[in-house]
Amino acid sequence: WLNTNQIERVWEQMNLAYNYGADRIWIVNVGDIKPMEFPISFFLEMAWNPLKFNETNISNYYKEWCKQQFPEEFKNEIAEILSLYTKYNSRRKPELISQDTYSLTNYNEFERVVNDFKILTDKAKTIYNKLSDEYKSAYYQLILYPTEASSNLNELYYNSAKNKMYAIQGRVLTDSLANKVIDLFNYDKKLSNDYHNLNNKKWNHMMSQTHIGYTYWQQPDSN
């Protein structure tokens, strides 16, 4: 769904292959091409010139890529968002998160994960509101949607975990947390619908893959 690997990981794998003599043909299985614009762009650039990137300059690619897509004045801020949301998602693939992924009681782990995403989403929305209309569709697809959708998903499971814990403890707020989970579930659907309606539904159904409620590696029939 939104499992965009960081390019540092991609570079490590490709650099290893190149150093072992795989320097004529590279084939990559990208799964769903549409939400993988960023890592695919990097793959193609490195395939064209494997020696262009190294451990000292790899992080600059975030800014280079964002400069190609959006106004240069925002490249640093957008590159930071792109780098961080992919970093956060690499903790655990979004579709494999559950209410048990992070701890509610140890070091406020789950709450800190959710807050990290909320801060990032606020930054992404601020930039969106500053962009001219010609960039907003691309920005929503490439930056804002994956950031906000990931944030919403983590918050959904956070509240689900709290609901379960509060129910065991017999707390008054148990039902309100259940309603919060339902609201976040519906907001996930709204975000996907907003994506599907961009550009006269040019990318309709691209975000229709189920991603909530996995119990093993295969996706569930519905969220």
Image: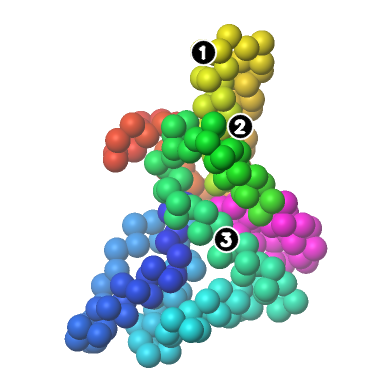
- In this view of the protein, which residue sits in the foreground, 187 or 208? 187
Residue depicted at 77% across the width and 57% down the height: 126
Instruction: Name the kind of residue labelled 2 in the image.
Output: Leu
Q: Is residue 135 left or right of residue 93?
A: right
Q: Which residue is mark 2?
A: 184
Marker disc for residue 84: 3
- Give the percent coordinates (x, y) of residue 60: 55, 80
**Image: 179 above or below 106:** above
Q: Is residue 147 above or below residue 71?
A: above
Label 2 or label 3, whichever comes before in sequence order = 3
Horizontal relation, residue 1 to residue 70: left or right: left
Q: Which residue is mark 1?
A: 168
Q: Residue furthest right?
A: 130
Q: Residue at x 25, y 85 (%)?
A: 19
Percent coordinates x, y for residue 68 in the rendering:
60, 78
Q: Nearer the viewer, residue 212 or 134?
A: 212
Circle 1 residues within 10 Å: few <14, some 14–19, many ≥20: few
Where residue 11 appears, as percent x and y from the top left, is: 38, 75
> Looking at the rendered structure, which numbered label has been put on residue 65?
none
Q: Which residue sits at x=50%, y=84%?
A: 57
Main SS of the magenta part reads: helix
- Is residue 33 shown in magenta? no
> Was residue 136 drawn as part of the magenta stretch in this picture?
yes
The residue most toward the left is: 21
Q: Earlier in the sequence, mark 3 or mark 1?
A: 3
How far apart, in angstroms, are the residues tagged by discs 3 and 1?
Answer: 35 Å
The amino acid type found where label 1 is placed reads Ile
Measured in 3D between alpha carbons, the distance from the residue under mark 2 to the one under mark 3, in whole angstroms, is: 22 Å
Span colored in magenta: 122-147
Query: Could you tell which of marks 1 and 2 lies nearer the N-terminus?
Result: 1
